Amino acid sequence: MEKVTLTIDGRSVTVPKDYTVLKAAKQLNINIPTLCYLRDINQIGACRMCLVEVKGARSLQASCTLPVAEGMEVKTNTPLLRQTRKTILELILSDHNRECTTCVRSKNCELQSMARQFGIKDIYFKTKLSPSKVDDLSPSIVRDQSKCILCRRCIAVCHEVQGVGVIQATNRGFHTTVEPAFGLSLNEVACINCGQCIQACPVGALKEKDDTEKVWQALADPDKHVVVQTAPAVRIALGEEFGLPPGSLVTGKMVSALRLLGFDRVFDTDFSADLTIMEEGTELINRIQSGGKLPLITSCSPGWIKFLETYYPDMIDNLSTCKSPQQMMGAVIKTYYAQKAGVDPGQIYSVSIMPCTAKKYECERPEMNSSGYQDVDAVLTTRELAQMIQQVGIDFVNLEDGTFDSPLGESTGAAVIFGTTGGVMEAALRTVAEVLTGQEAENIEYHAVRGVEGIKEASIQIGDLHLKAAVAHGTGNARKLLDRIRSGEGDYHFVEVMACPGGCATGGGQPIHTATEKMSTDFRKVRGQALYEADGQLKLRKSHDNPEIKKIYEDFLEAPNSPKAHKLLHTHYNKRDLYPVNKCN
């Protein structure tokens, strides 16, 4: 690749010709302030905080969009730049809801950090705040216009990464807002509840629906038996909220913290991930052997399910009928567990801790009540759990390791890797291969479906079957893959899709990091690798080897895909309107 040499703050650097000045400066560890910039996603120069001086240029230039050139001389730190950036920052703050102490992003807000960095002690520009509203109708996401700084990072993620595009900038100038068309709520448009907009937002304009108070009330009710389940991706991200390095495995500390919060039983969603593999793997084998609808597409990700129901309803029959592990566990808790423990299922309050904001929407789906009750009563994100732990004053880092409760706390390595893209596929293949061949597999690691490429393909020989598989993460990539399948270009037996880029490991409910931190760390890789390492450390690594899974079939479910298993663990999906009825007339 052709390279150019330029000078930044008197230091020479040689970089590829397609670099921007901002990216070149990073090579010299020169940090130019940014607000609207999001690497590889949003490079539009909207906030103007990244302005630099370029010799020979008539005006200051936005470094995030400015291409490098041979011999270019750039300055990033001059009196003019410092004053200009400070003025821009004061203008942004002049129309911003500055109730920082009550904001969910306090101490983790890029605007707040920048105000501190530039020594903002007073706002010179006095103005009345623009009229704004709080949209809290969605079960997953709350949008507060009074905190929006018009950086457009959420728009870029929704349009360019997720391929959904339900929010955009409306109006012009001082009256510009970021919202769904026609002033509708997120709950009235084709939002898939993935929460990637929350991850992109540098301030508190987007956040998850806070359900912690509902859980606190349940924990305080002596008539309720409150149980909790924790998803695999939570255990490799929760520690980040307490200062531990990304990817730290804190399973034992998490269990101990949940007990201290007052939960009566602490179960592991990994158990129901193993259960999901038994059901989904059997479903795949049945479809292949009986000429059923192929490819079979995974159904663990509720944001993905909603995306397909809305944008590709003609492919609903390709979806596995399996509920997600969260919902399987909810159904099992209020039937199998209630029966074994002698607890009235009507008194059970079932909570799940998830890396995902779409899980809040999923638990409210009317189909999710096969136990005779709402399968899951409340969903908390990783961030909300951290908030509860902090409220109680638990010294999380120094907790002793606890263990999950039986019988729903036993799991395998196959379940652990559910938390990263390709993990569900690999977990299923470990079981499907041995069921089809009747022999123990020599190698159970399927590296072809690992990694963070947007779409991965693999051809796997299982006995006489040449199984063709594909994996996509992020619904923008899913759209490309589905179009390929529709056109006949992609001929697969089995397809895994996760709504969020990187899978659950970087879900909408995981700890939020700044754009600068995301430039230096690929959280998809770091957290995903932690899950693979956790898998490798376990004695049992295949779902069908889990003794508690064998027992639940012997004692209760009879067999994978049995009528009883179907009633409790499977569901159906529905076509959704792309545009809200009676809203656009």
Image (cartoon, rainbow, N blue to C red):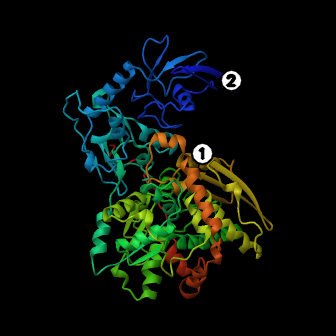
In what quadrant of the picture does the N terminus appear?
Answer: top right
* Residue sitting at the far front: 398
First in sequence: mark 1 or mark 2? Answer: 2
Instruction: State the residue at coordinates (76%, 70%).
Output: 441
Q: Closest to the observer: 309 or 427?
A: 427
| Position above or below: 351 against 488 | below
549 on left or right of 120: right
Of the pair 105 and 27, the residue shown nearer to us: 27
Q: Amino acid at mark 2?
A: Glu
Could you tell me the amino acid type at mark 1? Answer: Lys
Mark 1 secondary-structure assignment: helix
Q: Position of residue 462 (x, y in %)?
A: 77, 66
Q: Position of residue 155 (x, y in %)?
A: 43, 39
The residue pinned by badge 2 equals 2
Q: Quadrant of the C terminus?
A: top left
Tally of numbered tags: 2
Q: Which mark is residue 480?
A: 1
Q: Is residue 291 visible?
A: no
Q: Nearer the viewer, residue 85 or 243?
A: 243
| Residue 306 versus residue 69 in the image, above or below | below
Q: Position of residue 42 (x, y in %)?
A: 48, 35
Residue 222 vertical position relative to residue 456 in the rendered view, above or below:
below
Name which quarter of the figure residue 510 lies in: bottom left
